[in-house]
Image (cartoon, helix red, strand yellow):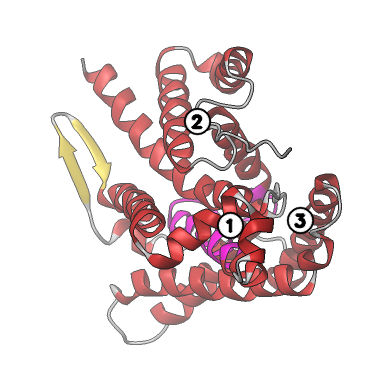
Amino acid sequence: MSLLSAALIDGIMYAAWLFLVAVGLTLIYGVMKILNMAHGSLYTIGAYTAVTMVTQWLSTDQSPYGSYLMLILAAVIAGLVLGLVIEYGLLRFFYQEEPVVSLLITYAVFLILEDTVKLVWGVDPYVIAEPYGLLGNVEFGDLFYPTYSFVIVVAAILAGLFLTLFLKYSRQGRILLAVIHDREVSQAMGINVQRYFLLTFIAGATLAALGGALTAPTISVAPGMGVEVIVMAFAVVVIGGLGSLPGAALGAVIVGLVRSFAVHYWPEIELFSIYAVMALVLAVRPKGLFAAAEARKI
């Protein structure tokens, strides 16, 4: 029972982290129909920005609990700046092109940002363990978990709830849903589609940066950390259905639990198990479990 409990708890924690990382990717695709290959670099820069701001904060005589605010501010700053630059300065000139063009552009941005990280922060790893250890541990029977891990779970839940409530109940969210369903009709009705694209990309970039910022205290922040993240994020959104918020949540839970049980019971197949589940889902549902219905134009 102890092993089963550990597998379940680890799976839930990993699923929450996966959702936080992948939700920005599925949001951008759902609205803009762009597979953002630069998502992993946005995650990386969010982590590096968090390292910089938390380190500066802890070097002063301020309360160490302020480091949590620095993590959030780092994500907002990184997401706002990079989202604005990438969408306003680059992507908006290619919306009329084939989807593969945007895919190649974001991949090029990914390569540029990866080298930018090395240029700005160097290649040595950074560690900021203070926010991770500051909250202590939580005990579940004979199992102990850092309280900070549950902070990530709460952050993922809040992000999902906020996006769901925003899309369903706010005026701007309903306008965004109209843009998602039919871009041309929305534009004909006077909706500034380009403005919503800009805001969506900034929001997606901020969510990616938030995932990196909240992860930074738990790992060694080093160049290349975004490569694995983008692979796992794609696995989540492909399983759940590209552009689907509930699909991203379900995909994260499936991948998180499968990986956790593989690690605890059969560690040799950890990586294979994730892709096996993805292949199985796609064999039954080629567009994912929660793929949105596509409008037919006649």
Category of crowding for the residue at label 2, using alpha-carbon neighbours closer than 10 angstroms: few (below 14), some (14–19), many (at least 20): many
184 in the magenta segment: no
Q: CA distance from mark 1 to mark 3?
A: 27 Å
Of the numbered discs in the image, which one, if any, rests on residue 179?
Answer: 1
The magenta region covers 200-226
Q: CA distance from mark 3 to mark 2?
A: 28 Å
Determine the secondary structure under disc 1: helix
**Which numbered disc flags the more N-terminal residue, 1 or 3?**
3
Residue 190 coordinates in the image, percent (x, y):
61, 71
Closer to viewer: mark 1 or mark 3: 1
Q: Is residue 65 visible?
A: yes
Q: Mark 3 = which residue? A: 110
Determine the secondary structure under disc 2: loop
Q: Residue at x 72, y 61 (%)?
A: 123
Q: Mark 2 = which residue? A: 290
Under mark 1, the amino acid is Val
Category of crowding for the residue at label 1, using alpha-carbon neighbours closer than 10 angstroms: few (below 14), some (14–19), many (at least 20): many
